[in-house]
Amino acid sequence: MSRRATVSRNFTTSSNWGEILNYRKIFNNLGIILLVEAALMVLPVIVAIAYREKTILYFLITMGFLAATGALFTHMKPQKESIYAREGYITVALAWLLMSLFGALPFFLSGSIPNYMDAFFETVSGFTTTGSTILSDIESLPRSILFWRAFTHFIGGMGILVFVIAIIPKAEGQAIHIMRAEVPGPTVGKLVSKIKASARILYAIYIGMTAVLVMLLYFGPSHMPMFESITNAFATAGTGGFCVLNNSIEGYHSHYAEIVIGIFMMLFGVNFNLYYLILKKRAGQALKDEELRWYLSTVAVATLIIGLDLMFTKFSPADAFRLSFFQVSSIISTTGFSSTDFDIWPTLSKVILILLMFIGGCSGSTGGGMKVSRIAVVFKSSARSIRKAVNPRSVETIKLNGRPVDEETVNGIIGYFAMFVLLTAFSVFIVSFEGKGLDTSSTAVFACINNVGPGLAGVGPSGNFSHFSLLSKAVLSFDMLAGRLELIPVFMFFTRYMIPRKTS
Amino acid sequence: MNIIIVGMGKLGMTLTSQLSGENHDVVVVDINGSVVTNTVDSYDVMGICGNGSTVEILREAGAKKAKLLIACTGSDELNILCCTFAKNLGTEYTIARVRNPDYATQTQFLREKIGINMIVNPEYETANEISRIIRFPSVASLDSFARGKVEMARIVLHSDNPLCDMQISEIRKKFKANVIICAVQRGNSVYIPGGKFELKREDSINITGTRTEISTFLKQTGVYKHRIKNVMIIGGGKIGFYLSELLSDTSRNIKLIDSDPARCHDLTNALTDVSIICGDGTDQAILDEQGLDNQDALVALTGIDEENIVVSLYAESKNVKKVIAKVNRHSYSILNNIGLETLVSPQNVAGSLVTRYVRALENSSGSANIQTLYKLVGGKIEAAEFIVPQNWAHNDETIKEMNLKSNLIVACIIRNGKVIYPNGDDCINSGDNVVIVTAGNSIKELHDIFKLG
């Protein structure tokens, strides 16, 4: 008896020992990320100088904090370099949390958002490219603050860690764990052999497409000013949805701007690997991609149904389909711009929009939601279960792009789906304590966890999130981070890896 | 350089680790998805899952524009097929692992008619390495530079060695032998010793010099071992076969033990002058019965690392002069500390051969001018031979004046066929061959020896 006890204790202690995290390396990486964030704040400072705004001081203070903390963290030299999947997840989760905590400072210090929790919510919403806001009068804010608000979308869209991988001198092969934790989608492949080159290609495509959008908005017939072209392009590229106008894109009263932004929102919801294939003159292969086809057909069908639904209420056909396309593109890419108050649309249209929230963009895009490929696999797997019930002896594999998806991935996707639903249900439960309407409480959670932005009713295009309590804002902030980082990294904090245990 | 590696067995993994570490763009192909995921997780490479000897997968891996393809799947035929396809798709160079002895005689045909640039046979190369050690038994391993003019030998200092507790500068004065101690391995650390460095018991040291000078030095220090006459080989696999063949042409008594009667029968047909014993060579009773006490050398080549290690430890305890064990899992660092002097692993032997070839390819395309390169002690030490280029800017500059990196030593200079053992007052001139030994740095061209900035 006693002998057995010793053996089992030895076993547990040795396994704990093997699971000790490489904290030094994690903090070292976090330090680099904070320094990069400090460097990125140079841009809003330039804006503040250009418009002669006093906010420059608050940005400089924040940069000072970032640089000091970053220097402190990077001072911690790792004893060993090796990191594994768990370190990758934790680095990413902590990085996003820290970035948001520091990123909220300019809003808070400048008094634009007097409450720190509100400022944190706004920053998380920015970095996770959600676009939910607690502000009611956006237009009154200083330009540099508005710029930083839109810029968080751009940083969060492709991911700051991917950016760090692209610029640090030597990325080890194990950086793939970090990239995998940050880039959305069930499987993450590299474009080329070197992870650094892959990250650079992704950012080059991202920046290139954003630049094209800026040009189209600025030089197009909408006559959008340069500052607003840039901030709107940032919000579109990251599929975020913060606009500098109170009425979002509706405020420009320009069909041209609506159509251009509508198309680009859709484009940023596409897997960036496909753009690389197109650049490599393999467009045929890119267009055959199954996820892309599901995505485009979903957009087409949803636009058609909502368009018809609107036509039968009160809109002219041209208006109906223009509004329908813009809103479908905005919601499925999880951007969250609005070109009209869709809260007054018929129920059918609103339900379709809610469904689109959950589908989200393609894997490897800047969009949120559950991702088209996951939904496709869940559908195929359900169909298989039904066929298997009818004919228990049938054997079949699930295929995507004509290639079998291995069972482990299928199980992972179904597990992800279940976790997503559970977290959504739990969050709705907490938020419903506020006593707000069912549509407000539920769509607030849907909009946050899927990184969309606006929901319906109280949180619809005309409303905002400022009326929620502290607890609800904390839960919603958590949902936004969980949705952007795809659950696992943030859930890591509740596992025993993160809870130091005393071994006797 | 774009390199495709097909087949992620032990050799494939070793090559991936070395080549991706040298900053090549590596694409790995394997039919097993989890192996590919594993590789991509550990190294900065791209992975493709599929059959590497199909045109479709090779296209996807980028065989059209690749510079080099290395096929090291478990099957010789697949490797040859894979190289042929790749060559026709446009890959510039191909290397195939071919290890069936039946094909060993056809390497020339494969090279000239099929267009495979290099055939690697890890078992044969391992046997070759072992035979070189047996021919020069005083040292734990031996590598040669400048077409054999200079050799680098590794010896282990046992407690009776007079070098123990001596400083490097004293050794030169006392023994007057023209050798240079260029690297010291102690436990798991590797040092490039300076004059004040003191050697300790159980250190393993690398010395460079001509073979006669190394011999003299070893005789002076009492490490020299006499010619090996009786060799016992445990395990009649491919390495055992090649080794018996390589050693049997000289007047040695070779005893080969294998437990499979059918295999023994095949071996008797193929080998002459080798006595073949059928029995379990890992059994202590059989080893004693076959006269382990009288053997000069024992080579443990069974398929199981643990058995090889146990048999070798037993042989060391019986005072067999030279004990060599084959291990596949060479990465375990404890292997350096268990008291076995000479360990060989086929994938490391083949791996360094291929790495050398890759570096040679780089030379032909770029400005680098490496002649030979050895990775020792599990890759911790690198010994590289360079030809000093014509546009060398440091002619007539003494080594003392040069701002060299730390952990680096100029082990020898070969000028007009004469070997110079440099001290601080020598200089490196255009046209010389120099051997550089480093720990921790990767030297790709001669300019890399200087400190940056």
Image (cartoon, coloured by chain):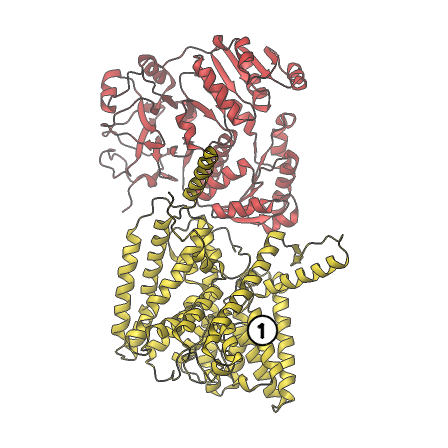
The colour of chain B is: red
Locate residue B393 relative to residue B369 in the image: left or right. Answer: left
**Mark 1 residue type:** Leu
Residue at image mark 1 = A356
Q: Label 1 lies in what chain?
A: A
Mark 1 crowd level (few <14, some 14–19, many ≥20, 10 Å Cα):
many
Locate residue A179 relative to residue A417 in the image: left or right. Answer: left
As drawn, the chain in yellow is A
Up-down relation of residue B125 to residue A419 (above or below): above
Q: What residue is shown at x 49% (from left), y 73% (from top)?
A: A445
- Residue, far front: A1
Up-down relation of residue A69 to residue A446 (above or below): above
Residue A83 at x, y percent in the picture: 42, 48
Q: What residue is shown at x 53% (from left), y 35% (from top)?
A: B11
Residue B328 at x, y percent in the picture: 51, 30
Up-down relation of residue B407 to residue A53 (above or below): above
